[in-house]
Image: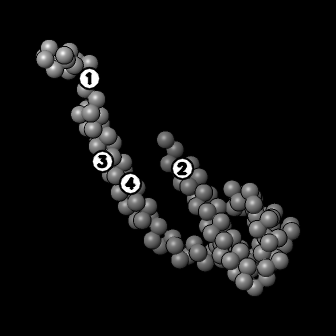
Amino acid sequence: MNIKQIAKDTAKTLSSYLTYQALRTVLAQLSETNPPLALWFQSFSADKIQDGEAYIEALFREKPDLALRIMTVREHIAQEVLEYLPEMVRTGIQQANMEHRRKHLERITQLDTSNPSPESEQQATPEENG
């Protein structure tokens, strides 16, 4: 397991997600202030946001002012969110894991009581079978 590579991949994914959140914020603003540009922006952005950095590069070629706006909003969101993120991720994963384990335990316990094994059917008395 390469922890540094996992950290790099996580940072890239988080950066792309924050780019997506910035896009949503700017799109909402444009919908109120400049509906035609909002339509263009929504059309341009469809299916391009998987890689946030490539998306911003493409946006710079089309509308540099929007690319700068996205970068500014993304940076602001990052500053606001990243303070809480490590603890929230750690706690969220721990709670989710506990919930998954609980559900799994419930499932396997219910299976044991509702689906008798062939061995327990063979042990049943003749009156129960007949």
Q: Nearer the viewer, mark 4 or mark 1?
A: 1
Q: Quadrant of residue 46?
A: bottom right
Quick one: label 3 or label 2, which is nearer the N terminus?
2
Badge 3 element: helix
User: Does residue 121 appear left or right of residue 70 in this picture?
Assistant: left
Residue 8 shows up from this direction: no
Quadrant assignment, res 123: top left
> Which residue, given by chain and number where applicable, does mark 2 sit on?
6
Relative vertical location of residue 95 with respect to residue 32 in this rendering, above or below: above
Few, some or many C-alpha atoms within 10 Å of disc 3 (few <14, some 14-19, many ≥20)?
few
Q: Horizontally, is 112 left or right of 44 in the view?
A: left
Query: Dot 2 lies on which element?
Result: helix
Which residue is tagged 1? Answer: 117
Question: Mark 3 is on which residue type?
Answer: Arg
User: How far is mark 4 from mark 1, CA to CA?
Assistant: 31 Å
Task: Name which residue lies at 26% across and 23% down.
Answer: 117
State the image coordinates of residue 29 (x, y, percent, origin top left).
Answer: 70, 81
Residue 75 numbered mark, or none: none
Q: Residue 5, how many percent across, how many down?
A: 56, 48
User: Which numbered circle lies on residue 102?
Assistant: 3
Disc 4 on helix, strand or loop?
A: helix
Three-letter code, disc 1: Ser
Q: Is residue 94 left or right of residue 30?
A: left
Expressed as whole percent of the image width and height from the top left, the position of residue 27 reads: 71, 74
In the depicted structure, whether residue 56 falls above or below residue 101: below
Q: Which mark is residue 96?
A: 4
Q: Earlier in the sequence, mark 1 or mark 3?
A: 3
Rendering coords of residue 12 (x, y %): 62, 57
For marks 4 and 2 on the same chain, the one whose residue lies earlier in the sequence: 2
